[in-house]
Image: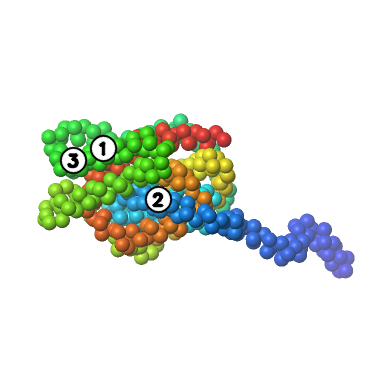
Amino acid sequence: MERHVEAIKKEFQTDVTLNRVADFSRTAPKKFPSAARQYLLDKLPIIQWLPRYSPSWLLQDFMAGLTIGVLLIPQGLAYAKIATIPIENGLYSCWVPAAVMVFMGTSKDLSTGPTSILGLLTAEIVRDLKNEYTPTDISSAVAMMVGIWSLLIGLLGLGFLLDYVSIPVLTGFISATAFVIGMGQVGSLVGLSNVPDGAFNQLGNILKRLPHWDGPTCGIGFGTVLVLLILEKIGKKWGHKHFAIRYMASSRAIIVMVIFTLISYLVNKDRDDYLWGLSEVNTHGIQHPKAPDGGLLAKVAGRAIAPLVACTLEHQAVGKAFARRNHYAIDQTQEFNYLGVTNIINSFFGVMPVGGAISRTAVNSECNVKSPLNGVVTAGFIILTLYVFSPALYWLPKSTLAAIIVSSFHPSTSQRQRLYNVSMHH
C-alpha cells in the first residue's frame, strides 16, 4: 500500500501540468498588479497620454473638436438619409463615438461616426427586414452586431484577416458605392417622389420625368450644389493663405445648411403648404436607452459582416495613413476594441453603425489636433445640438441634404482609394 502511495506522490511531483499550476499559483499573485496595469494601459490608452497632456494643446483640441462637431451635423443627417432611417437618428449616432474615443482611441486624428458606405449597406438590410421591424430597430441591431464582431476580432487578435481583402475589389466597390448613393439622391434634389430602386432605373426615370421636376426644389438643390462648389474652389485657391479661408471651405456643408435652412424658414413659416419638401427633423435630446431585440440580432448577425468589413477597413486605413503622416503609430488591435465598444454602446440609442471617416479625419488633422481629448468637445456639441439647436433643423430642405450628399463624393472617392492602397501596402 505504502509503495502505491509513494508512486502516486512521485507521479504528482513529476507531473508537468501540475507543476505549472503550482508555479503559477505561487507567482500569479505577485505578477497580477503589473499585469492588470498593463492590460488597462492597453485597453484604456488615456491612462498613458493624459499625464503627458500639455495645457497649451487645449485651444487646438477645442477648435478641432468644435469643427468636427459642426461637420457631423450635416453628415449625420445625410448618412442617415442614405441608410433610410429617420434622419435625426444620424445625430443620435454621433456623440457616443466621440466620447468613447477619448478613453479608448489610439489615434488623435481619427473622427468616428456615420459614413456613406455604412449608410448604403445599412439601407440594404433595412430594405430586407422593414416589413417585420422598424428601420431604427434594424439599424440599431446592425450596429450591435458590427460592435460584437469587431470586439471579437480585437480580443482574439484576428485583425490580420483584413490583409487578405483584395484592393482592386475594394476600390471598385467604393466607386460603385459613390455612384449608387449619388443616383439615389437625385430624386430628392429635383423634387420627384416614387423613384424606383437601382441606379440605372433611377437615372432613366428621372430623365423621363424632366417636365415634372419641381422648380422651387430644383432652385434650392442646385443652389446648394453651386455654393458648395464655390466654397470648395475658394478653399483650394486661397486656403493656404489663411486658416479662416481653409476653415470656411472645410465647413462648407454646415454653411450651406445654415443659409438654406434660414431661407426655408423665412419662405415657409407662414405657409400651410410648404414650397418644397422639408426634413422636419424632430429630436428631444438623447433617446432613452433600449436594447436591440434578440430575434432581430439573430437575423442581422450574418448580414452585419458586410458593414463590419467596410467599417473596419476604412477605419484602419484612414487611421494608419494619418498616423504615418503625423509621425506616430496606432494600435490596430485596440482600434478594433474601440470600434466594438463604441458600436455596442451606441446601439442602445437608436443609431446606425459607425466607423472612421476620411473627410472628417482630414479636417481634424488640418486643425492640428493634439490628442483624442477633442472628442469631449465634439460629443458635447452634438448633445447641445440635440437639446437646443434641433428645432431649427425642422426647416432644413430635403433637396439641400440631397445636394450635400451628391457633392460629397467627387473629391473623396479617389482620395479614399489612395489611402487604402497606401495603408494596405505598408
Eyeballing the image, is 425 above or below 361?
above
Q: How is the image coloured?
A: rainbow
Q: Is residue 90 left or right of residue 64?
A: left
Q: Nearer the viewer, mark 3 or mark 2?
A: 2
The Cα atoms of the two marked residues, 3 and 2, are separated by 28 Å
Q: Which residue is mark 3?
A: 219
- Label 1 CA crowd tier, 10 Å (few <14, some 14–19, many 20+): some
Location of the C terminus by quadrant is top right
The three-letter code of the residue at mark 2 reads Thr
Residue 413 location, quadrant: top left
- Label 2 CA crowd tier, 10 Å (few <14, some 14–19, many 20+): many
The Cα atoms of the two marked residues, 1 and 3, are separated by 10 Å
Label 2's element?
A: helix
Q: Is residue 410 left or right of residue 48?
A: left
Eyeballing the image, is 207 above or below 347?
above
Q: Where does the image place residue 414, in percent across and percent down from the top left?
A: 41, 33
At 48% across and 36% down in the image, what residue appears? 420
